Every structure is written in C-alpha cells, then in structure tokens.
Image (cartoon, rainbow, N blue to C red):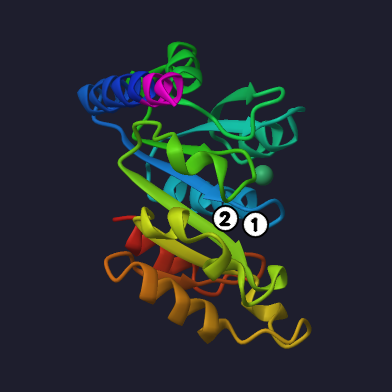
Amino acid sequence: MELGANILGANKRIADDNHAHLKSHGIRSFDFVGSIGSGKTLIIEKMIEALKAGGKRVGCIAGDVAGDDDYKRFVKRGAVAENVNTGKECHLDAHMVDHALEHLKLDEMDVLFIENVGNLVCPGDFPLGADKRVVVISVTEGDDMVRKHPLIFTIADLIVINKIDLAGAVDVDPQILVRDARNLNSRAPVILTDAKHGSGMDELKQALGF
Ligand code: MG
C-alpha cells in the first residue's frame, strides 16, 4: 500500500515537471486513453492532418506494449514522433514520457499528442503531464463500456464515442454511452465521431481548443 502511494506520488511529481516543461515551450498537449481498437490512432492521425493544414507543428508519442505500428502511422502523416514500448506495463507513466520528450525537438512543436497503451483501467492512476486527458471508446465495445470503467470517465477532460457509423450493425444505442458518461462526468464534453468517414471530427478539433 505504502509502496503504491510512493510510486503514484513520484509519478505525479514527474507529471507536473513534464507539464511545466511542455508549457515552457508553449506546447499544448493531450493524453489519448482508450480501449484497444477504439480508434485512438486514427483519430490522432486525422487531427494531425487537420492541424497541419492549419499550420500547426505536431508531435506524437506512440505508447504501445510492443511494436512501432502506430509510430509509423504518425510519421507518415507528417508528425514528429517518438515510439515508447512499455513491455509488460499496461500504461505509459510520466517517467516514460519525460524520457520521450528528451528525444523530441520541443521548440519545433506546437501540439503534442500522446497515445497511451490501449486500456481503460491502468492509465487512470498515471497522469503524464498533458493539458487534457481524452478518453476514447467505440460503440463496437458494447453499451456498458462506460459503466464498467467509472474511474477513467470520471477523470476525463473530453470523452469521444467513436465508430458511430457501426452502431446499428452492433445493435448499440450511442445515447446510452452518452448518458452514462454524463452521469459520471458532467464537466467533460462528450463527442460522437466516425473518424473513418469524418463525422464529428470538426467538433472534436474544436473541443480540443483548435
Ligand atoms: Mg493505437
């Protein structure tokens, strides 16, 4: 118990340092958390394109247990990126992000997207120092996903429900997810998206403050 508190306390201190570090370079930062296959990577790719079109310089940290698939996708879209493999860990922590920031040219970046490891539980305890935490789920995961993971939705700054184009096919009413999210968190905007075909993406960009 004590060890757990120490680890979380140390993570929080590094997260605060990361935040100050990013702010000192004028960078706006977002930690994307969500289940595996919810569409985090595609949403970030679409945001990279939209922000680049508006003249913003975008950086990404791709967090995954293994591999560099998402990292390559970000680079292909024109972002400066750093890959972080967590090995056995089911979340990024602030120290991993601190280390990744050392490899990125922060003076050449306006926005940083961090894609956390696909998981709706573990990342909840580990703030990274980003301005906002964005939680992404998709309708294909079922209409009980919000209720089953209350902590992550309670601490979210923005909630995205993706793949709404598939709602009928999987017999899920997105409004149930919206209702559950609002019950847990009345502060965070809830945005319905179909990242693949583009619907809701302008709204999401606006909600991110662009
Ligand atoms: Mg991904």
Please tell me whether residue 115 is drawn above or below residue 82 in the rendered image: below
Q: Are marks 2 and 1 in contact (CB under 8 Å)?
A: yes
Q: Which residue is mark 1?
A: 39
Q: Residue furthest front?
A: 1
Between 54 and 137, which is closer to the camera in this rendering? 137
Between 182 and 69, which is closer to the camera in this rendering? 182
Q: Amino acid at mark 1?
A: Gly
Q: Amino acid at mark 2?
A: Ile
Label 1 neighbourhood size at 10 Å, few (<14), some (14-19), many (20+)?
A: many
Q: Tag 2's secondary structure? A: helix
Location of residue 193 by image quarter: bottom right
Nearer the camera: disc 2 or disc 1: 1
- Residue 109 in the image: state x and y as whole percent: 38, 28
Between 53 and 163, which is closer to the camera in this rendering? 163
Q: Tag 1's secondary structure? A: loop
Please tell me whether residue 102 is drawn above or below residue 50 in the rendered image: above
Q: Which residue is mark 2?
A: 43
Q: Tell me, yes or no, whether the highlighted magenta stretch contains residue 134.
A: no
Q: Name which residue lies at 65% across and 73% down.
A: 139
Q: Name which residue lies at 35% across and 36% down.
A: 130
Between 83 and 150, which is closer to the camera in this rendering? 150
Magenta region, residue range: 1-8
- Residue 48 in the image: state x and y as whole percent: 51, 46
